[in-house]
Amino acid sequence: MLIDNHYRNINYLRLAVTDRCNLRCNYCMPSEGIAFAKKDELMSIEELSKIGELLVQMGIDKIRITGGEPFVRKDLMVLLRNLKNNEGLKELSITTNATLIGPYIDELKELGIKDVNVSMDAINKDTFERITRRDHYDIVYNNLIRLITEGFNVRINFIVLDNQNVQDIIPILELQKRYPVSVRFLEEMPFNGGSKKFNTIKWDYKAIFAHISKAYPSIQLIPSPKTSTSINYKITGHKGNVGIIPSFSRTFCGSCNRLRITALGDVITCLYGPPKINLRDTLRGDSSEYNIKRAIQQVIGNRAATGFEAQKEHKGVFDNSMTSIGG
Ligand code: SAM
């Protein structure tokens, strides 16, 4: 087991496979993109597979593949297949914008990958395309419905953006009357590549809940797993849950079970903190597996207690874009 210095069990790895994305969501990066990494700076499939293997040996039993957009990497399925060979891995899941997943759906099923988070910040086509700065609404919507109807556990991630998509909060929940899909509303965070700075948000988790409960007074709090970042609810007659994630308010740090590794190999022990070690360089050097594991153990033994504490260690934290961190 991987236990940190605050007695939290770290069993969940968010592994980014690229920093590139085919969308340009305006809350994530500037329209021209960011300085994306060169190909040889990204970890190879062998390196990503090795990291997965070592971390599962150390106690990670849940890996979520993220990015950038994971499916822009043509060799993604090779990685998924390799990771699936790790016996101790109980859950392998993906976070995607669902633009490119279509041709891989059958293979994902064959591999037994069931949990797919789809990022979709509007149900209205114009709003969606204004936010993402690309005209991919139809393909995203069709892939979303295909994933749901083919039996995947799908959760929609919807970032609540003041003056942009608040009017879509209730309409996107209407989907749950027809389809078994959970929708999770997240607070916006200032990881946007420096395009917009802010210290407070209007649409925090309380405002989001107030907005939803006004439209659906029957909304009920339901129990959540101890390490859940979302506060979860059920609306009568809806086939999926509703989650609200205080990602900027950071109310859940006390039970944080996550470790992040970026596509460049940086190990991030808190979303709001600086990278602690670089595993790509360690793997490309002559370190033994024992030394790599020791280095990982050391950074886990030195985690900030909360995202607010981590932020103090990281002056340039909000110059980052989520496409580099992996969300
Ligand atoms: N491309 C994949 C996707 O769209 O889900 C995975 C990577 S994306 C960076 C992961 C998640 O981060 C998405 O749900 C996205 O909406 C979220 N995200 C990006 N920038 C954010 C920000 N500034 N605040 C809150 N969430 C953000």
Image (cartoon, rainbow, N blue to C red):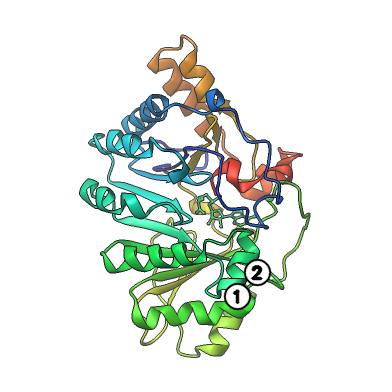
Tags 1 and 2 touching, CB below 8 Å: yes
Q: Nearer the viewer, residue 254 or 174?
A: 174
Q: Position of residue 1 (x, y in %)?
A: 35, 36
On the image, numbered disc 1 is attached to which residue? 208
The CA span between labels 1 and 2 is 6 Å
- Mark 2 crowd level (few <14, some 14–19, many ≥20, 10 Å Cα): many
Amino acid type of the residue that numbered disc 2 sits on in the rendered structure: Asp
Q: Nearer the viewer, residue 206 or 95?
A: 95
Describe the element under mark 1 as helix, strand or loop. helix
Ligand 1 is located in which of the four quadrants? bottom right
Amino acid type of the residue that numbered disc 1 sits on in the rendered structure: Ile
Describe the element under mark 2 as helix, strand or loop. loop
- Give the quarter of the image for residue 211: bottom right
On the image, numbered disc 2 is attached to which residue? 204
User: At 45% from the left edge and 82% from the top edge, which residue is drawn?
Assistant: 174
Q: Is residue 271 left or right of residue 142?
A: right
